[in-house]
Image (cartoon, rainbow, N blue to C red):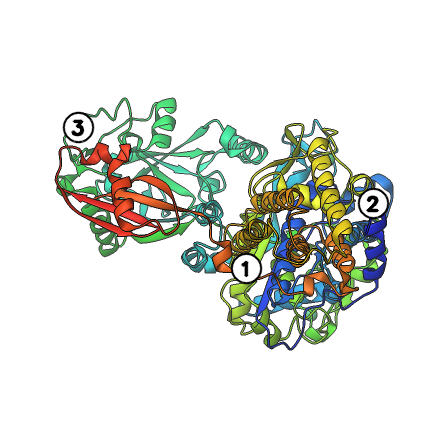
Amino acid sequence: MPEKQYDHRQIELKWFERWKDDANLYRAEENSAKPKFYVLEMLPYPSGTLHIGHLRNYSIGDALARYKWMRGFNVLHPMGWDAFGLPAENAAIRNNRHPREWTLENIAAMKRQHRRMGFSYDWSREVNTCEPEYYRWNQWFFLRMLERGLAYRSKALLNWCPECGTVLANEQVVNGCCWRHESTPVEQRALDQWFLRITDYAEELLDDLKRLEGGWPERVLTMQRNWIGRSEGAEVDFALEGSARRVRVFTTRIDTIYGATAVILAPEHPAVAELVDDTTRARVKEMIDARARQDPGDLRKEGIFTGHYAVNPFNQARVPVWVANFVLTGYGTGAIMAVPAHDERDFEFCETFGIPIVPVIRPADGALVDPVREPFTGYGILENSGAWSGMTSEEARPAMADYAKEHGFGQRAVTFRIKDWGISRQRYWGTPIPVIHCEHDGIVPVPEDQLPVVLPLNVNITGKGRSPLADVPEFINVTCPKCGRPAKRESDTMDTFIDSSWYFYRYCDPHDGRAPFDRERIAYWFEIDQYIGGIEHAILHLIYSRFWTKMMRDLGLITNDEPARRLFNQGMVIKDGAKMSKSRGNVVSLDEMVERYGADTGRLFELFAAPPEKEMDWTDAGAEGAYRFLGRVYRFITRNADRVLPPGPCAGDEKVRRKLHQTVRRITEDFETRWHFNTCISAIMELVNELYANENEICGEVMHEAMEKLTLLLAPFAPYLAQELWEELGNGEQPVFRQPWPAFDAELAREEQAEVVLQVNGKVRSRLSTPFGTDRQQLESLALADDKVRAFTTGKQVVKIIVVPDKLVNVVVK
Ligand SMILES: [Zn+2]
Ligand SMILES: [Zn+2]
C-alpha cells in the first residue's frame, strides 16, 4: 500500500464525529467484576475558554485512564464545573450579563474544547455546582452540621469598603484599598458570620497525613502540616492589676516564664476594650485595619502600651501590658508573654520598645551566649528561675505546667494554627445558606422538605451595598416555619470551596434526587485512586475536602477516612519563560493549536517536553517536532499495513523484537511507578527509529507485531492517531483503548547490560555495567579492579566477597 501523508484534521475530525454521540464510549460500569480505578482531575472553574496552559493535567489524567482501561480496569473518569464564584459576578457588573448566562456559556465553550481534545470523560456523570440539583446537597449537609453544632454563627472581622458600603472578598482588596475605589483604604468590621468547626478535626487531619505518605507529594503534606500548625505548650493566667480579669497566655516555652517582661495582646483580644482609653482606642482600630491590608511578611512590628500592668503568677513580677500587631487572635489565646531573651520575635519587639531583657536559660553545653544582645532560643538549663533553677527545659516544661494547674492558674495545652472555616459570603452567585431569621424564634433551619432554597435569578448585581439577595423581596420575605409569623431568609451565600469539597462523591451517583449519593456506590469507587491537580490547591481545597470526608463519615454516609489515596501535582506550562496569562500576552489558544497541529500533537508534546511534575516550556519548534514524529509513525504504518512478505526469519527480526519488547516493558513499568511519560515517549521514538532502520530486514510477521504494539503503546498519548492506525491495521472501528495492553516477553525485554552495584562493607561505592549472566569469578575480579572500590580496600584484608549475579558485589574488608 502506498504511504499516506499525515492529515491531522481529516483523521481527528473523522473520529470526533464518530465518537461524539457515543454515550457509552467512556462510560464507567455500574456493576462490574473488574477491579475499579477512579482517576480524577480537579474540576475547573469555567472562566472562559481553555488555553494550552490548562492542558497538562487533563493530558496526564487521560493517558492514565486509557492505560487503565487497557489493563482491564473499570475506570471512572468524570468531569464537571466549579461554577459558582466571584468572577461571574464581576463579569455581570462589567458586561451587564447575568452570572448564570455567562457561566453556562463558558461551560459550553470549555466542554466543546474538552471533547475536541478527545479527553475520555464519562459525560453522563457531569456535575455542575451552580445547579439546584447539586447545591441542594450543600444545604442539606449544612443543616446536618447545624444539628450537630458543627455549623455555628459568630462575629468575625471582614473587609469593608466605606465608599461602597459593602463587604469585600479578599480578592477585591487591592493594595489595601477597595478594587473599585483605589484610594479608599479597606476597614475591618465585625459582622455575624457562619462557621464550620473544622478545628474539631484538627488532630485527625494532622494524624491522618501519615497515612497519605508515599501517595501524596511530600511538599503537600508539609504544607498541610504547617497549615494545621499543632503546638504543644501551656496556658498561664496573668492577673491584671486593678481588675478582676485575668489574661490567659499561650506559650510553648513555659520554662522561660521567669524571663517574661511583658504581656502582649492581639488588637482584637476582648480584654483590650477594657484597657484602652480614647486615644489608644483609635490607634488599636487603625492597627486592625492596617493588618488586614498587609501581607503578614511585610508587617512592621507595632505596639501600643495600654498603661496597665499584669502579674506573673510564678514570681509575682509586675509586667506592662501591650497591644501589638504581630500577635494573632486565632492562635492560642490571642495573648502572649514576651520573653525577649529567648525568642526572636519578642526580642525584636522589646528592643524596639525599650522593654527589659532578662535571661533565664543557659546552654546545657556551657557555650557562651549573651541573650541581652542576641536571643538564645534553644533548650538549656534554667537560671534566675526560683526553685526551678538548675532544671533542664525538657524537665521544666511539663513540671511547670502541672504546677500551674495545681495552683489554679494554668495547665498543659495544645493549640492549632488552623481556624474554623468562615463560610458566609455577602455575594449573589453561590449556594443560599438555608436558615431563616425570625424575631421570635431566632435562627430557624429551613425544613428539609423545603430544600433546595433556590437562588433567585431575578436580581440586581451592582457590587455595592449588602448581599444582592437581601434586595430580592420574593426571596428574602418568608413565613417562619416554627411560628408562622413573617420572617427573613439569610441573605449570605456559602463559600464556593464547599462546592468543591465533595463534588467527587457526586460523580459516583450524579442524578440521585433522594440523597447526596448512594452509600454502596461510594463504597465501590472510593477512595479516589489518583487525583491530579495544581499545587495551588495544596492547602485549602485539600484540607476542606479531607474535613468534608471525615464529617460525612461521622454522619454515617461513607466509610472511608480520606478522599484520595494518591495525589499528583502537575508542573506548570510556561511560554517565553513565564506562566501563561492574558496580561503577559503569552497565551497560546487551544483552538489555534488544535487547528494547526491537532489535539494529539498538543497532548503528546505536553507529555514529552518534561517530566510531568516539572515545568514545561511550550515552543513552536517543540510542537513541530511532536507533529513530525506522529507523521513519521503514520507514514510507516500506512505503507506497511498490508505487508505479508517476506516470510521469516529475516536478518533484523531479533533486533527489532528485542527493541519492541524492551519498549513495552519500559512504558508498562513507567505507568505503574514513576510516570515519566517524557521518557516513555522518547522510548517510542527510539522504537520507531529502529523500525525505519530495519524496515526491509524484518519478516511480515514481526512487522505486524511491531506495528500493532506500537499503535497500542501510542493509544494513551495520541488517541486519535492510534485509533486511525488501529483501523488501518484491519481492526475496524473497535476502540483501541479497550484492547488489552500489549504484553512483553520477559526474556526478550531483558536489558542486555545488567547494572551491578559494588559495595565495600555494605556501603555502595560504585556501579558496573556488565552483560547479563556474567559469572561470579569475573564479577569478583571486576569489582576488585574498580578504582572507587580500590580506594576503600587498599591496605586492608579482604575477608570475603558476596556476589549476587547481575545485581551486586559486596567486598568485606577489615
Ligand atoms: Zn469601594
Ligand atoms: Zn418564628
Can you tell which of label 2 and label 1 is closer to the viewer? Answer: 1
Asked if marks 1 and 3 touch (Cβ < 8 Å), the reply is: no
Residue 153 appears in the picture as rendered: no
Residue 104 appears in the picture as rendered: yes
682 to the left or right of 161? left
Which corner quadrant holds the C terminus? Answer: top left
User: Residue 510's quadrant in the figure?
Assistant: bottom right
| Marks 2 and 1, how far apart at CA | 31 Å
Indicate the amino acid at tag 1: Phe
| Marks 1 and 3, how far apart at CA | 64 Å
Indicate the amino acid at tag 2: Asp
For marks 2 and 1, the one nearer the N-term is 2
344 to the left or right of 514? left
> 101 and 372: which one is in front?
101
Q: Residue at x 58, y 56 (%)?
A: 531
Q: Where is residue 121 in the image (x, y as percent from the top left)?
A: 72, 60
Q: How busy is the neighbourhood of tag 3: few (under 14 within 10 Å), some, or many (20 plus)?
A: few
> 58 and 704: which one is in front?
704
For marks 2 and 3, the one nearer the N-term is 2
Q: Mark 3 sits on what residue?
A: 367
Q: Mark 2 sits on what residue?
A: 7
Q: Where is residue 99 in the image (x, y as percent from the top left)?
A: 81, 50
Query: Is disc 2 placed on a helix, strand or loop?
Result: loop
Indicate the amino acid at tag 3: Ala
750 to the left or right of 387? right
Q: Which residue is drawn at 77% across and 51% down?
A: 638
> 733 and 399: which one is in front?
733
Query: Is disc 3 placed on a helix, strand or loop?
Result: loop
For marks 1 and 3, the one nearer the N-term is 3
Q: Residue at x 68, y 73 (%)?
A: 448
Q: Mark 1 sits on what residue?
A: 744
